[in-house]
Image (cartoon, helix red, strand yellow):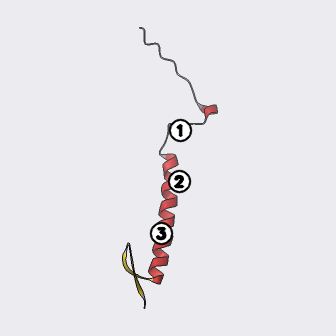
Amino acid sequence: MKMTKTKYGWCSQTEIKIFGELDREIKQKRKDDSKQDCPFIVPKEKREIIKIDWKK
């Protein structure tokens, strides 16, 4: 069995393939989650403008 040095340590080709797939899934999930973590980003059509009178 041929072992290769990777960022995970010494891994076989099968392990490298599995870790690569997991990395891609994790990165995709982070991209999807980051869009949900921004509640202030609202399309222009759905925005509400609130005016506050500060002179009271």
Which residue carries the number 2 mark?
Answer: 32
Q: Position of residue 44 (x, y in %)?
A: 61, 33
If you read the primary sequence from the N terminus, does the residue marked by circle 2 or circle 3 appear first?
Answer: 3
The answer to whether the residues at label 3 and label 1 have Cβ atoms under 8 Å apart is no
Mark 3 closeness class: few <14, some 14–19, many ≥20 residues within 10 Å = few
Determine the CA span between mark 2 and mark 3: 15 Å
- Of residues 38 and 4, the one nearer the viewer is 4
Q: Amino acid at mark 2?
A: Asp
- Say which element carries label 2: helix
* Residue 22, label in figure: 3
Q: Residue at x 48, y 69 (%)?
A: 22
Q: Please, which residue is most extreme toward the right here?
A: 45
Q: Position of residue 11 (x, y in %)?
A: 40, 81
Q: Residue at x 38, y 72 (%)?
A: 7
Q: Is residue 1 above or below residue 10?
A: below
If you read the primary sequence from the N terminus, does the residue marked by circle 2 or circle 1 appear first?
Answer: 2
If you read the primary sequence from the N terminus, does the residue marked by circle 3 or circle 1 appear first?
Answer: 3
Q: Residue at x 42, y 8 (%)?
A: 55
Q: Quadrant of the N terminus?
A: bottom left
Which residue carries the number 1 mark?
Answer: 41
Q: Quadrant of the C terminus?
A: top left
Q: Position of residue 47 (x, y in %)?
A: 58, 30
- Say which element carries label 3: helix
Q: Is residue 46 above or below residue 14?
A: above
Determine the CA span between mark 3 and mark 1: 29 Å
